[in-house]
Image (tube, rainbow, N blue to C red):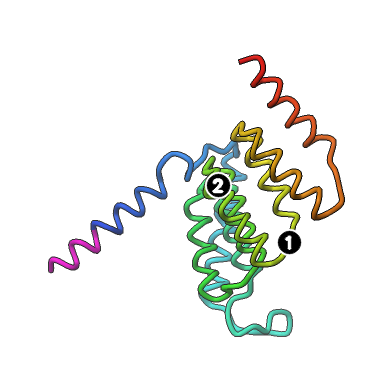
Amino acid sequence: MFKKLISLFLTTLFLAGCLQSGWTVKVDLTDEERQEVQATVTEYKDKIKNYEPDEVFFTPDPPIPFWVELARAYETLGQLGDALDTYEKAKDYYPRSQAIENNIGRLYEKAGKYEEAVEQYLYVAEEFQEPKYYYDITWVYIKAKDRKNAEKYFNIWQLATQKTDGQTQRAIKDLREEEKAN
C-alpha cells in the first residue's frame, strides 16, 4: 500500500512537472483547425495502437513517421509535454533514431528549456557524428542571450562544416552590442 502511494505521488509530481509553464503553450488555432489536429492525434494514436506491417510499412513495430506525426500534432495543439511523452515512448522501439532525438531537442528549445535543449543537441551531435547540431546549439544560446557560448558553438560549427552564416553572425553581433550597452 505504501509503495502504491509513493508511486502515485511520484507520478503526480512528474505529470505536474510536464504541465508546468513551458510544456503547454498557447496556440492560435480556429475551432476548425483545432478539431482537424485533434482528429490527427486520434488517427495516429489508432495507427500506433493497431499497427500491422503492410507493403508500405513493414517494420515489426509502429514506424517512426507515425510517432513523429502524433508528436507534431500535439505540438501544433501546444501540448509540448504530450509531444515529448510521444517521442519518449517511440524511443522504446527506436532507441537510436536521429529524427526522434533531434525533435526532442526542438521541443526543449520551444519550451524555453535551453539547458536541456543544448544537452540534447550535444548528445545528437556526438552520437550521430553530425556537426550541424552545433548550429542549433548556437541558436539556443542566441535565444538565451548567451553570446560567449553562441560564439563558441558557432565557431565549432564553422570549423566542422567549413561554412558560415551571415544571419547568425549578425545575431551574435547584436548580442555583443547589447552587452556593451548594458
Q: Is residue 129 above or below residue 151?
A: below
Looking at the rendered image, the disc whose residue lies closer to the viewer, 2 or 1, is 1
The answer to which image quadrant residue 12 occupies is bottom left
N-terminal label among 2 and 1:
2
Does the magenta segment cover residue 2? yes
Instruction: Determine whether the residue tagged by mark 1 lies in a helix, strand or loop.
Output: loop
Q: Identify the residue at horizontal 66%, vertical 63% (top origin).
A: 99
Q: From the top left corner, tell me how far across and down residue 174 is, in percent.
A: 73, 25
Query: Closer to the camera, 58 or 15?
Result: 15
Above or below, 15 relative to 141:
below
Residue 175 screen position, x and y as percent: 68, 26
Check disc 2 and report the residue beneath it: 77
Residue 17 as seen in the image, left or right of residue 158 = left
Residue occupying the far left of the picture:
1
Task: Name which quarter of the figure residue 14 lies in.
Answer: bottom left
Hey, what amino acid is under mark 1? Glu
Q: Main secondary structure of the magenta part?
A: helix
Q: Is residue 37 left or right of residue 164?
A: left
Which residue does the image show at 66% across and 47% down from the upper left?
A: 137
Disc 2 residue type (three-letter): Leu
- Mark 2 in CB contact with mark 1 (< 8 angstroms): no
Pointer 1: what residue?
Answer: 130
Residue 70 part of the magenta segment: no
Residue at 49% across / 68% down in the picture?
Answer: 89
Determine whether the residue tagged by mark 2 lies in a helix, strand or loop.
loop
Closer to us: 94 or 151 = 151
Tell me which segment is drawn in magenta. Answer: 1-8
Pointer 2 local density, CA inside 10 Å: few below 14, some 14–19, many at least 20: many
- Residue 69 spot, x, y in % from top left: 63, 61
